[in-house]
Amino acid sequence: MDPRRPLPHSGAVSSTDPAVPAPRGPGAPEEPALKRAIGPKLLILFVIGDILGTGIYATTGKVAGKVGGALWLPFAIGFAVALLTAASYVELVGKYPKAAGAALYTQRAFKVPFLTFLVAFMVMCSGLSSASAAALAFSGDYLDELTNGALPATLMAILFVLALAALNLRGVSESVKANVVLTLVEITGLAIILGIGLYAALAGEGDPARLGDLETGGTGYALFSGVLGATALGFFAFVGFEDSVNMAEETVDPQRTFPRGIFLGVAVTGTVYVLVALASSLLVPTSTLEKSSGPLLEVVKAGGVDFPHELFAVIALFAVSNSALINIMMASRLCYGMANERILPRAMGRVLPRRRTPVVGVVFVTLLAIGLVSTGEIAGLGDTTSFLLLCVFAVVNVAVLVLRRDRVAQRHFRAPTVVPVLGAVTALILASPLADREAGVYIRAGVLVLIGVALWAVNKLVLRVRGEDHPRGD
């Protein structure tokens, strides 16, 4: 997820980058516009890089545990659901080409600042749960392949989170440069899996019959609920495409560039995911995949190709590190932005004088991430990420319909009305108890949101006591 998530308020857009001064008062000179440097090809690569990561590297086996050998099915359904919501984002970014995302769309559509805050905070929490899942994936079977299981997993996950926090505090430049390298590495890892799968298929290896097995523990409702549960968890692999809209102010001709960029980016990653799922199920028994926190390593071991297992483990460690780094960056910057808008306590907007990084925001999200790592597991945290973002996607799809009455001068992509309707319905279904989701996911998400509500309430009380104006739009 992109670290430049904007501030949720009455519609104006501010920068959450600590290097940029806070918004100025009336009559002050305007800040210079962002440079439009992202063309169509670069945007497609950005979308692909933003989606790829921990979801496919770490939760493939957990999805298999819910659905059986037909592992490809949840990813195919998730692909379709992602395309529906992607169409809504494409329409909205064409109408409002600002670096704002779900928070801006929610505010424009409903004009309820507290709802806007909830959407922004849920996005932040989804980043934390995603980063925490990545931390546990880092400390699991991929690391064990290099250390023979000699290191305690939870401790290593916590140290991993602390290391990311340290990199985040050092500076956004260092973090972004690391992100570029790690993205290339994670793409390489998936290309290796696809190559192994193709080789195995041509050589007649594996068990093709397994690809049609649906092992959801029953028929009828149980089958329906099991597939929904697997799809909801598998949807974790698709999150990230929505963040590309935050690059709208830095994209050349966004009304023309974004439809192609987002749709092609989601299509490429969706195709890759389905193919990786097919290769995984073809070569590795469901029981083996389910037990592994490094399922793609099992594919390498079973593929009949002499590829160094340790090398793939290193590639996978880089891949999950990339996801965690991006999400920790996003969460800390969003925390900083909300503090600058006086939606959260102002102290949370403090920055390091020399590094110009949001120190309190980084510390806050790091502590939450450590709590999640210490109390959760990969599947539960991945499902928490999906649940939070599915709730946000439902709001965004409804916002598209509400904002149809808001006419704009420029031409832009317009999705058929049925698309946001289906997007909202499918998001709500996947977020509902119909999706065979453990109660712990709802509890974890609820606790995270309640922390945000408590901070919001304390901040509001302090502002009232001081007699200061409340955040804009409230």
Image: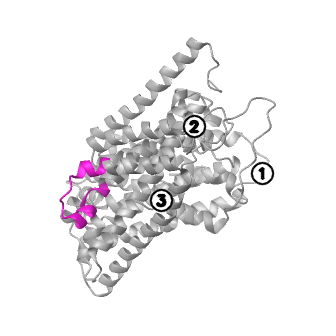
Where residue 14 appears, as percent x and y from the top left, is 66, 39
| Cβ–Cβ under 8 Å for marks 2 and 3 | no
User: What is the span of residues highlighted in magenta in the rendered image?
Assistant: 137-158
Please tell me whether residue 96 is drawn above or below residue 238 in the rendered image: above
Q: Is residue 341 left or right of residue 309?
A: right
| Cβ–Cβ under 8 Å for marks 3 and 1 | no
Q: Nearer the viewer, residue 438 or 451?
A: 451
Q: Secondary structure at mark 1?
A: loop
Quadrant in the picture for residue 196: bottom left
The numbered dot on residue 51 is 3
Q: Which residue is mark 2?
A: 337
Q: Is 143 part of what is drawn in magenta? A: yes
Where residue 29 appears, as percent x and y from the top left, is 80, 37
Q: Which residue is mark 1?
A: 410
Closer to the chain start, of discs 3 and 1, is 3
Name which residue lies at 35% across and 63% down: 317
Amino acid type indicated by mark 3: Ile
Name which residue lies at 56% across and 12% down: 465
Where residue 237 appears, as percent x and y from the top left, is 41, 57
Q: Nearer the viewer, residue 299 or 270?
A: 299
